[in-house]
Each structure stands twice: as structure tokens, then as C-alpha cells.
Image: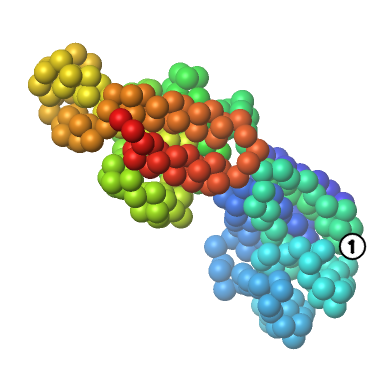
Amino acid sequence: MIRLSDKNLAQSLKKDGLKPMYYVTGNDEYLVDRCIAGIVKSAVGGDTDELYKFDTAKSTDEEIEQTVFTYSFSDKPRAVIFDACEPGSLGKARTELLTSIAADIPESTTLIFKQFIDDNRFSVSKKVEGFVSSCPNGVIVEAVAKKGYELENYIANLIKKHGCTAADAVSKDIAELCGDDLMLINNEVAKLAALSDYGEITSEHVKTICIRSAEAGVYDMIGKIERKDARGALLVLGDMLDNRTAPLMITAALNIAFINYYRARLAREKRYSDKKLIELFDYKPNDRKVSIAFERCPKFSIKQLERIIAILYELDTKLKSSTVDERVIIEYHIARLAFEAGAAK
């Protein structure tokens, strides 16, 4: 049995050649799918007619056996993907069938088993190791979510692949805003590369484009918070999370919005105009965010805004350090914001 990480899979395919069976497992679905795409490309190139996919638990024995063991007249290479493959939960009969197939894979056929584990903690189980060992030269590919320095290094290399340059701080900024969601990071870096005209990506570029994608939903959420509507705020949050907006990006956009509210509230206390506010804090002329903050900030007292900013600081800290599910953390704190809006001013 061979074990590879997502980082050295491509090198192994190029140097050692294609193996008959791959079990791709991990807690980052983007990485899992990217590894599978690399194996499929190596196996069948662009010939999608020779790519077959099965739901491991729901497909019938006959469907699986017929696809794996029926040779085409042209002897074309084929790849067969088994999605949601977890040997410990498939049942005895299905596990035995897959084990027997893995032990005797037809020539020109590559079997790919996919297992995505939706958990912060990741390890390969003994049952998976035993299953993969049933195939001579079977390969386990581990696609583990990247954290800390490894994530920042991944972002730095991605920026280089787009032909851009950036200071180390830029990779850190992107990691803080997008969390460890690699699909989101790839999308944002592609946008940043285009924004920079494929030159140097700066921290200002990051603030401009990454926050912008979360702003619309955040202002809808703040509207619900203003009306003390915790349920409505949580529904908006749920839609944003379902659309793969990273919790850290939502928090960053909320923080910026409420800091703008706080500054606007202070300016109103001094009887300053919105133009004076722009001048004091060096906003861009006619910045829409300033006018929104200036119009809506009277709905909060200065004390309320101070408490809200403290809650958001706590939320940011917990998202970056806690092992609790991110969705649970952010939902709890958004509910607290709505409660704070209804508290005594």
C-alpha cells in the first residue's frame, strides 16, 4: 500500500505512473475533488465517455460489476469513481464486493474511491487501510485541510501561478478573510490577479475585492439586527454560509460595517456632516458605505456599538482558535448581536 499527500500526488503520477486503485480521502472537499480530477486526467485524458461514476451505497451489484468487468472492444483506458465510499458503513456484502473487485482490477481500468470527511480532525481509519491493502499497489491519497503557515504558503504559490507577486502579508490577509476554504481562496486569488492586471497584489486589493463579495449580505443582516430580528439575521447568515461565503469573511465585513457605524455615531455627536466624516477618516469621496453608516447609525447608541464591536472581536478570535464548528460559533454570536440591538441604550 502506498500513501501520498495531495501535494505529491501529481509528482507520483508523473514519475511512477498510474496505479490501478486510488482511495482519495480528506476533510477538504475541494482538495479531494482536485486530486480525483488529476487521477482521471492521467487515466483517460479528456475522454469522458470512459469515465463512470457510482454512488457507492446506492448502486446495484449488477451495475458495478457490469461496468468494471465489461471490456470495450477498443480496449480504451477507463476510470471508475465510487463516491461516498466508507468501508466501515457500507455493509458486509457491499464491502466484500468492492474488496474482491479491488483485488482483481481489469487491465486499463483505474478505480477511484472518494471519501470526504466533514470534520476538522482527520485521520485514515484502519478499515480504510485494510480495504486499500486488498489491491496490489493500492494508493491512499490524503487531502487534508491546510492551516497556518501551510495555508499561507499555498496562497503564496497560487499567487505565483497566476503570474503575480505579493508581500507575505498579503497571503496572511487572504487566509484571515477566507479561512481554509480552498475553493473560495482560489476564486478570490483569480479575481485579485485580474484586478492587479497580473502584477503586484497588495493588501488594498484584498480589502477591496474580498470584502466586497460579503458586503451585500452583511448589510441585509445588519438591517435585521437593527430591528432586533434574530431569526431574520440568522436566515440571512444561513443563505450566505450555504453560498460558501467564509465565516471569517462575513465577520470581517460585519466588523468594518460596525466600525463605520461607530465613527459615524461619534461624528453625529459632534454635529459633523458626512463629508467631514470622510475627511476625518480618509474615506474615498462619495463612499456609499459612509452614507449608509451616517443614515443608519442613530439606531444604535455609542455604548451599544462598543459592545457590538467587542462581540465581533470575540467572534473573530474564536473562529481562528476554537475547534467548535464554525457555523455554530457564528450563529451564536449573530444572535448575540441582535440581542444587543434590543438591549438598553
Give the crowd class for mark 1: few <14, some 14-19, many >=20 residues within 10 Å: some
The mark tally for this picture is: 1
Which residue position is annotated with label 1?
A: 134
Q: Is residue 284 left or right of residue 51?
A: left
On-image quarter of the C terminus: top left
Q: Name the residue nearer the viewer: 317 or 345.
A: 345
Q: Is residue 129 above or below residue 180?
A: below
Q: Is residue 318 above or below residue 141?
A: above
Mark 1: amino acid: Ser
Residue 327: % across, % down = 53, 47
Who's the residue at 16% across and 22% down the image? 268
Who's the residue at 60% across and 45% down the image? 325
Who's the residue at 59% across and 60% down the image? 45
State the scheme by which the image is colored: rainbow
Residue 12: % across, % down = 73, 44
Can you see residue 148? yes
Q: Name the residue nearer the viewer: 95 or 272.
A: 272
Q: Furthest-bottom residue in view?
A: 62
Q: Name the residue nearer the viewer: 126 or 240.
A: 240
Q: Is residue 211 left or right of residue 106?
A: left
Q: Furthest-front residue in view?
A: 344
